[in-house]
């Protein structure tokens, strides 16, 4: 219709077949047609081919042909040659200029017949009956195609040929846009199309639809949701207007701002709180803005001795919330005060504060908070306070009594202040009676100090003692009973020191009040080791040193430690003394070792390893670990406090002041501790008097547990050719020579400690140098008996210094031996006496001999 001139489609044959003719259409508009009408001649094969038609992405094209066809019957004189159909062909090609019709390459689409034929009518009427036929064909292989019409003897006019393809048109479904999409190649094919979310929307579930062969959209899946601040209107997302908000894309639409909030601009996702109102982090945007509470009201306090009951009413204004909670502060914080049910995060309005000091002024502050207190910046402002003074209370019972200086008719009692004195202690009262008499008759003594000498007792009699303290508030309760026995006779005074000391060291164990006589007959009573049950675990076998420390040591809250003074320097930093008041326990004196700042990982591990080792031991002659501080700096190791410090310095300070039996008592303690360690399979490696600590009762305890330190940090440790850092004078030859450290090498060191003790802290081998010491030992030289040393003791030392370690006694044997000596003090009386023979050969050049006495005096004999 639109071509003004000739179409000039290819025709074959070029003459006498299809002819291009201009005619008037039904609206009297001139159009181009192709006609053929060779009905009278047989064997017609007339081809007409369109120009090349580009495919333009289509996969299936539709061909609509409008034509007129004459009814053979209406044609006068026609024979059997007249046909009433024609054939439609197509041929796919990239070539847009094929010049002639290659009939063979065309594929037949269909034979087309007229639905309606027409009979020739008067030209004056101009009524034309048009046939319209549509056929579709798959074109997928080339850029374009040609169509061809084959006439085999009909009378046809082609009026119009329309070629088209179908698309599913651009559409928006579930807030996703789907583009204009060409249908698939087959009549049943569905093309899957992914939609894209419209502006201001986000995917809820991948939007998808299928484009059907007819250009219809089918099966919509998924879709999008309008972003926060936007809602759906007419398939698009529109901003919420001022005063409205939408917080989440899944919210159905914009909602009005909740109370005490507003939004000034379009597209709000949350409404801002009015001034003076707040929202907690956990409050949803749909919640009204709220305020912190006002202060608690009507705080009242009721004092009951050393407890206070605090009660209050909820705040007048809760700020529109229901999460009000309370917390308490005390002016003048104390470590052990108890708050019940708690101190913070309280929902109730009643708290009992107990364990306060008696007769002490306290101020308690009760704070009210809710979810927006933090946000409002008024975290602690809403509070009310009350001041109280606790009542006077009687003191708690005295928890421990010890006896010293026991004789036939007297003993000295001493005790510690009650855990909770609850005021100034004015007096102690001691009540005692013979155990057999029960309380039928008893005596009372009163004293201002924490000790008393009790005289006028019967010999070899067990007495029961109770002590109580008095303050202005009156007497406290009596202590539990403590039993002590008087002596039978000689030598027992010193013996008592040792025995009573031992019972003192059981202080941290379950109440044990053994009578004196039972201790005498059973000296091993205090040993906690059940044969072979408990074995020492090397903390260095733990990959994580912190795991070891927390397995074996208790973490102490640093607020419970009061450091008082520096008492020395340890290898890792200062050693201080101080007090520890652990929750629910009485205050005790402690030593505090700290790790100086700037330590390396290795130093931290080594420092804490001592606590991991010590924490595994529980014996009256092993220094007791109270705990560690690892959660804040500096790191600390807290042990029991040993009033007399290290044994070597202590003995030097008290040179000659102890009886032999007292010295043996000390040695027995050390042997007992070492037996315990050896039963646990622990080898000390650095047993020396400097590593033994002494408490106020002369109880000796083994200390200094560390591993690397043994070989590196002891000032006595010397560098040898084969082994670094060994305390030569204390170490067995096999340990020096080839590092064979065993319990038997600890026994050697124990022999040296015996010598140090009996000689009151003398330096073993005096000022001989290490090489000479090694040589002398090798040659069989052994330290001589110190002055006044009982022969049996020196013999025991010599046994400890047997070259063959299998020949040395065990700690168990040493302990038995010492116990035997204590039971038979007479055996200790015989000393060597030939003091001038106890000399060490210092130098000999065959002209003179230099010797030194055990007292450190030097002599040189010339021309010997
Ligand atoms: O001989 P001393 O007074 O006893 O000096 C050293 C110093 O700290 C460095 O080690 C003393 N010391 C160590 N542990 C304790 C403890 N548990 N009780 C008392 N003093 C201690 C040691």
Image (cartoon, rainbow, N blue to C red):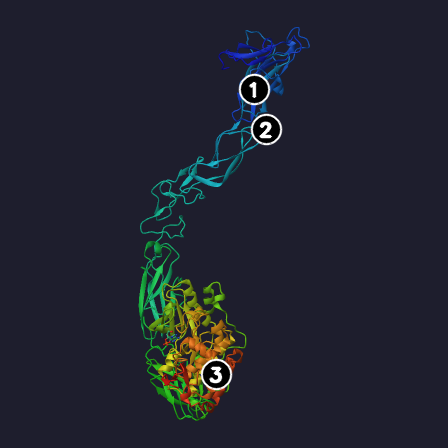
Q: Where is residue 767 drawn, in percent x and y?
A: 38, 79
Mark seen at residue 798: 3
Camera-nearest residue between 571 and 364: 571
The secondary structure type at the circle numbered 3 is helix
Tell me where residue 219 sits by quadrant. Answer: top right
Q: Where is residue 332 drawn, in percent x and y?
A: 32, 69
Give above or below for 604 relative to 756.
above
Spatial separation of the CA atoms under disc 2 and disc 3 = 113 Å
How many discs mark residues in the rendered view?
Answer: 3
Packing grade of label 3 (10 A; few <14, some 14-19, many >=20) is some
The secondary structure type at the circle numbered 2 is loop
Packing grade of label 2 (10 A; few <14, some 14-19, many >=20) is some
Q: Tell us which disc is closer to us: 2 or 1.
A: 1
Spot the residue most to the right: 80
Does label 2 or label 1 sit earlier along the sequence?
A: 1
The secondary structure type at the circle numbered 1 is strand
Does label 3 or label 1 sit earlier along the sequence?
A: 1
View quadrant of ligand 1: bottom left
**What quarter of the picture does the C terminus occupy?**
bottom left
Does label 2 or label 3 sit earlier along the sequence?
A: 2
Q: Where is residue 125 drawn, in percent x and y?
A: 55, 8
Q: Name the residue under label 2.
A: 187
Camera-nearest residue between 738 and 404: 738
Q: Mark 1 points at which residue?
A: 146
Q: Where is residue 293 drawn, in percent x and y?
A: 34, 57
């Amino acid at each position: 219709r639109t071509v003004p001139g000739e179409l000039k489609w290819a025709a074959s044959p070029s003459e006498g077949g299809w002819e291009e003719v201009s005619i008037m259409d039904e609206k009297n508009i001139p159009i181009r047609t192709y006609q053929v009408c060779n009905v009278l001649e047989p064997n017609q094969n007339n081809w007409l081919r369109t120009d090349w038609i580009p495919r333009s992405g289509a996969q299936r094209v539709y061909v609509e042909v409008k034509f007129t066809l004459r009814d053979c019957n209406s044609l006068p004189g026609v024979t059997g040659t007249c046909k009433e159909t024609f054939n439609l062909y197509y041929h796919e090609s990239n070539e847009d200029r094929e010049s002639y019709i290659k009939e063979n390459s065309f594929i037949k689409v269909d034979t087309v017949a007229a639905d309606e034929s027409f009979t020739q009518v008067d030209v004056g009427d101009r009524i034309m009956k048009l046939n319209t036929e549509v056929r579709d064909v798959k074109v997928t292989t080339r850029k374009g195609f040609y169509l061809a019409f084959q006439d085999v003897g009909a009378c046809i006019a082609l009026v119009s040929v329309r070629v088209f393809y179908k698309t599913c048109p651009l559409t928006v479904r579930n807030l996703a846009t789907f583009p204009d999409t060409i249908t698939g190649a087959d009549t049943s094919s569905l093309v899957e199309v992914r939609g894209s979310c419209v502006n201001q929307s986000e995917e809820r579930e991948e939007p998808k639809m299928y484009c059907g062969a007819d250009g219809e959209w089918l099966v919509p899946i998924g879709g999008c949701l309008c972003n926060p601040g936007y809602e759906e209107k007419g398939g698009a997302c529109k901003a919420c207007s001022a005063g409205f908000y939408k917080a989440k894309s899944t919210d159905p639409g914009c909602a009005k701002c909740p109370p005490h909030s507003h939004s000034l601009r379009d597209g709000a996702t949350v409404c801002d709180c009015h001034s003076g109102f707040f929202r907690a982090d956990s409050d949803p945007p749909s919640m009204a803005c709220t305020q912190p509470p006002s202060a608690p009201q009507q705080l009242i306090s009721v004092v009951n001795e050393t407890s206070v009951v605090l009660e209050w009413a909820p705040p007048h204004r809760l700020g529109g919330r229901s999460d009000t909670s309370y917390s308490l502060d005390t002016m003048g914080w104390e470590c052990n005060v108890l708050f019940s049910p708690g101190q913070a995060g309280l929902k109730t309005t009643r708290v009992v504060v107990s364990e306060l000091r008696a007769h002490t002024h306290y101020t308690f502050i009760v704070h009210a908070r809710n979810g927006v207190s933090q946000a409002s910046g008024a975290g602690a402002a809403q509070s009310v306070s009350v001041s109280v003074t606790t009542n006077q209370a009687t003191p708690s019972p005295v928890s421990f009594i010890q006896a010293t200086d026991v004789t036939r008719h007297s003993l000295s009692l001493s005790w510690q202040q009650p855990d909770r004195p609850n005021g100034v202690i004015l007096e102690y009262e001691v009540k005692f009676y013979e155990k057999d008499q029960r309380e039928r008759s008893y005596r009372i003594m009163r004293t201002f100090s924490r000790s008393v000498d009790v005289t006028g007792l019967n010999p070899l009699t067990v007495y029961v003692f109770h002590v109580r303290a008095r303050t202005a508030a009156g007497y406290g309760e009596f202590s539990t009973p403590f039993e002590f026995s008087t002596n039978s006779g000689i030598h027992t005074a010193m013996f008592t020191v040792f025995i009573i000391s031992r019972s003192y060291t059981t202080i941290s164990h379950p109440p044990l009040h053994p009578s004196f006589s039972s201790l005498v007959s059973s000296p091993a009573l205090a040993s906690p080791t059940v044969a072979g049950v408990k074995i020492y675990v090397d903390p260095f076998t733990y990959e994580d040193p912190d795991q070891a420390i927390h397995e074996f040591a208790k973490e102490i809250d640093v607020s419970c430690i009061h450091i008082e003074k520096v008492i020395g320097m340890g290898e890792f930093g200062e050693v201080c003394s101080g007090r520890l008041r652990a929750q629910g326990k009485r205050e005790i004196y402690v030593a505090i070792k700290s790790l100086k700042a700037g330590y390396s990982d290795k130093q931290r591990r080594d420092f804490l390893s001592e606590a991991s080792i010590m924490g595994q031991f529980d014996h009256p002659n092993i220094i007791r670990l109270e705990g560690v501080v690892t959660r804040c700096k500096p790191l600390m190791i807290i042990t029991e406090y040993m009033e007399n410090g290290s044994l070597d310095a202590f003995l030097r300070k008290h040179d000659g002041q102890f009886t032999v039996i007292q010295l043996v008592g000390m040695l027995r303690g050390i042997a007992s501790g070492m037996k315990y360690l050896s039963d646990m399979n622990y080898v000390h490696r650095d047993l020396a008097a400097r590593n033994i600590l002494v408490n106020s009762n002369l109880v000796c305890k083994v200390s200094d547990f560390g591993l690397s330190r043994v070989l590196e940090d002891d000032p006595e440790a010397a560098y040898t050719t084969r082994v670094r850092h060994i305390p030569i004078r204390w170490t067995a030859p096999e340990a020096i020579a080839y590092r064979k450290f065993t319990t038997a090498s600890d026994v050697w060191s124990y022999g040296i400690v015996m010598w140090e003790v009996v000689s009151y802290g003398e330096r073993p081998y005096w000022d001989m140098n290490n090489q000479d010491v090694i040589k002398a030992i090798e040659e069989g030289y052994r330290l001589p008996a110190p002055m006044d040393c009982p022969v049996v003791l020196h013999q025991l030392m010599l046994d400890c210094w047997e070259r063959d370690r299998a020949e040395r006694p065990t700690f168990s044997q040493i302990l038995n031996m010492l116990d035997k000596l204590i039971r038979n003090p007479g055996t200790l009386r015989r000393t060597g006496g030939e003091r001038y023979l106890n000399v060490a050969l210092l130098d000999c050049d065959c002209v003179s001999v230099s010797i030194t006495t055990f007292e450190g005096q030097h002599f040189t004999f010339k021309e010997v």
